[in-house]
Amino acid sequence: MRRLALLLLLALVLPPAATAAPASVAIFYYPWYGTPSRDGGYQHWNQGGHVPPADIAARFYPAGGLYSSSNPRVIGKQMREIVAAGVDTLVVSWWGWGSLEDERLPRVASIARAAGLNVAIHIEPYRGRTAVSVAADVDHLRALGIRDYYVYGATDIPAFDWATVRPSLLGVRLFAQTSMLGFAVAGGFDGVYTYTVSRTTGASFRLLCREAHQAGLVCAPSVGPGYDATRATPDPFVRDRQNGTTYDTPWQRVIGANGDVVPITSFNEWHEGTQIEPARSTSSAAYETYDGAWGLHGKAAQDAYLERTFDWSLQYRLIRDDEPGWISR
């Protein structure tokens, strides 16, 4: 009953899917998983030489088992979970024309919009990426009605190159993954976002957003539940979830920082252990669970991060609604 009442309240403050929200909760989404039954083999679950289904390239195991991102039933379930968590924008990982993610994008976008989500693109550092190629990418992708583009590793390309192509990109918003505000302004970006959540606690969010607003930029500091890529990459660094505290802290700080957009890293980047998609226990000690998060245990803990995201999303929007001028504390 409480959750139904809160969902009704959230519906009053959520923006329509067809318009860009002045205050938005976005989430990074990866459509790159595959299974033998649908795709002829495992995709991404087997990264780094792992042998699914018992052995996967992640420190957590999906609650529903290994899935294919080409399965519309899977996508539909994921979109419903994302909407129920209070998120309004899906930011889809995209690796260039003709990539697996490009091929799957139209279906993902269609199902996401049917669920009530806006759709944005996370332009990844694909081979041969330049400012000119990204400008062509935008022309290619906006045929799908996509307005917002998050450019990961934007500083890999000179600001001058971005500024050169920016006049041709009318009617879209570009976000640079950087805290270098001078670079973003010089490159003609509309906003900045951080994405990486492995080593950040959000302590710098207030300063970042204050200076971004002074520069006329949209500020989108990312929040995330933790980080553990040890089963998928050589990176030994681990940021423990601390039963949910690691997730709560940046949420508190992004609200206090007057963030315009709250991007969540991530819904399902299982390789880096940043996912909030439901996870379950297995018979193998190789996998962690959400057990203990906010005092939840067993099956109740599987959805813990989605439930907590709903609470934070609601609080964020209610504060924004109560403070139309969004005066910095």
Image (cartoon, rainbow, N blue to C red):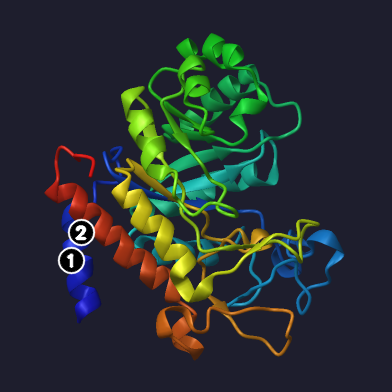
Q: Up-down: is 117 above or below 171?
A: below
Q: Up-down: is 77 above or below 217?
A: below
Task: Characterize the local packing of mark 2: few (<14), some (14-19) or many (20 or more) Cα atoms within 10 angstroms.
Answer: few
Residue 115 visible in the shown view: no
Residue named by callout 1? 8
Q: Give yes or no for contact between labels 1 and 2 (Cβ–Cβ under 8 Å).
A: yes
Q: Nearer the viewer, residue 183 or 72?
A: 183
Name the element at disc 1.
helix
Task: Characterize the local packing of mark 1: few (<14), some (14-19) or many (20 or more) Cα atoms within 10 angstroms.
Answer: few
Residue 251 visible in the shown view: yes
The residue at the point 21 percent across, 74 percent down is 4
Which image quarter holds the C terminus?
Answer: top left
Residue named by callout 2? 11
Which residue type carries mark 2? Ala
**In the displayed structure image, the side of residue 270 where residue 217 appears, left or right:** left
Report the disc number at residue 120.
none
The residue at the point 58 percent across, 45 percent down is 93
Across and down, in percent, residue 154 comes to 59, 29
Which image quarter holds the N terminus?
Answer: bottom left
Which residue type carries mark 1? Leu
CA distance for labels 1 and 2: 5 Å
The residue at the point 37 percent across, 72 percent down is 307
Across and down, in percent, residue 216 comes to 33, 23
Name the element at disc 2.
helix
